[in-house]
Image (cartoon, helix red, strand yellow):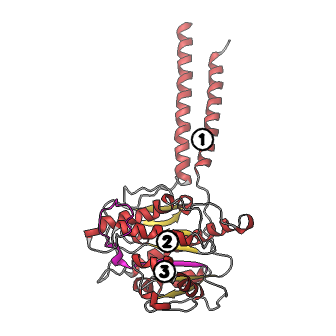
Amino acid sequence: MKNPTRWVAAASGLVLTAAFLASSQDQASAQPAPQDTDPPDHVVRLVFIHHSTGENWLADDNGGLGLALAENNYFVSDTNYGWGPESIGDRTDIPDWLEWFRGPETDRYMQALFAEDGQNSSYTRLEANPGGENEIVLFKSCFPNSNLEGNSDDPPAEEGGYSVGGAKYVYNQLLAYFKTRPDKLFVVITAPPVSDPSYAENARAFNQWLVKDWLNENEYPHSNVAVFDFYNVLTGRGHHHRIIGGVVEHTFASGRDTSAYPTEDDHPSRAGNRKATEEFVPLLNLFYQRWQESTAGAGGEIEAVNTADATLAPLTPDAEGASPQALPPWGAALLAAAAIGSVVVLAAFIVAVVILIRRRGT
């Protein structure tokens, strides 16, 4: 071969081109699938089971959740103290959910809940009731339910009461009812944190279980159940449960398990509630769109889609504000450029070696 230097240079060019194309393909494949966070294209009825914390969250001059939901095409109603048959609205602690959803009067309670179209708190909502039943049910226990006894890794326990094991047992039991109503979307709002650190580690562990493991452990087959980690959002300024960059972000700093937004008691502050509203509403849109996609399957039946797997990015609790999302476009481009630069350096080195060998041979 008359000119091996040119041959090596040409080969290096091919290597460089191939590396660039491969890098571009890897970058494209690494981008997260876009999440549909558009509001419903028609007015959807929603009912929220709550007490005073939920009342503050809904209020226009506090959390603004009612107004934000109205702006996203949800017609909101709610329950409060004294609501419903047997005043079931008085009872919203974690053990009480068995009475709501798995008790002898469940059918009567649900009939009243799905039909409820009134306001039991003060907030702005859409003027026109679209008719029909409530399609979405939000339900939340208040902050005392973050004082769960026992150990952080306790398994479900039927007689557990206000403990990690007891709470796991309750939520596992609820799935039996939710499975019978694929025509409704049930959204768990985790109980807000408290300032007392005595049981804070247990509260963190239980809510982590709800978000990450609850549906998976039960092999729940439908997409009509979702969880919003209200607790996590309120435990740190950089703690989040939201959609950012097309990916659901659930992040927190280890050891930060008490309320970061307290008031004179453990009701979340206006700032905490506003933050929760900003993060929750796009997630609710995502939960709704995924639920609707599943109901649009053959014959209108629910497809086997696990909402937990479908919406959560890997958890990264190592640093406050750390994000598990994919690299932004500029970051991916920088990484690709670095890889290409390495290939260029290698090609230049090969050419230099060949030139040196030729000179020594002449």
Residue 259 visible in image: no
Corner quadrant of residue 63: bottom left
Q: Give the number of the disc on residue 303.
A: none
The one of 273 and 200 positioned closer to us in this rendering: 200
In the depicted structure, whether residue 361 falls above or below residue 176:
above
**Dominant secondary-structure state across the stretch colored magenta:** loop
The one of 347 and 319 positioned closer to us in this rendering: 319
The picture places residue 315, in percent across and down from the top left corner, at 44, 56
Q: CA distance from mark 2 to mark 1?
A: 47 Å
Which segment did they paint magenta? 135-158
Q: Quadrant of the C terminus?
A: top right
Residue ID for mark 3: 100
Q: Earlier in the sequence, mark 2 or mark 1?
A: 1
Amino acid on which the number 2 mark rests in the picture: Leu
Residue ID for mark 2: 174
In the depicted structure, whether residue 211 falls above or below residue 81:
above
Name the residue: 59% across, 66% down: 223
Q: Secondary structure at mark 2?
A: helix
Residue ID for mark 1: 23
The one of 108 and 308 positioned closer to us in this rendering: 108
The picture places residue 84, in percent across and down from the top left corner, at 50, 90
Q: CA distance from mark 3 to mark 2?
A: 9 Å
Residue contact at pointers 3 and 2, CB within 8 angstroms:
no
Residue 240 visible in image: yes
Q: Is residue 153 magenta?
A: yes
Amino acid on which the number 1 mark rests in the picture: Ser
Q: Secondary structure at mark 1?
A: helix
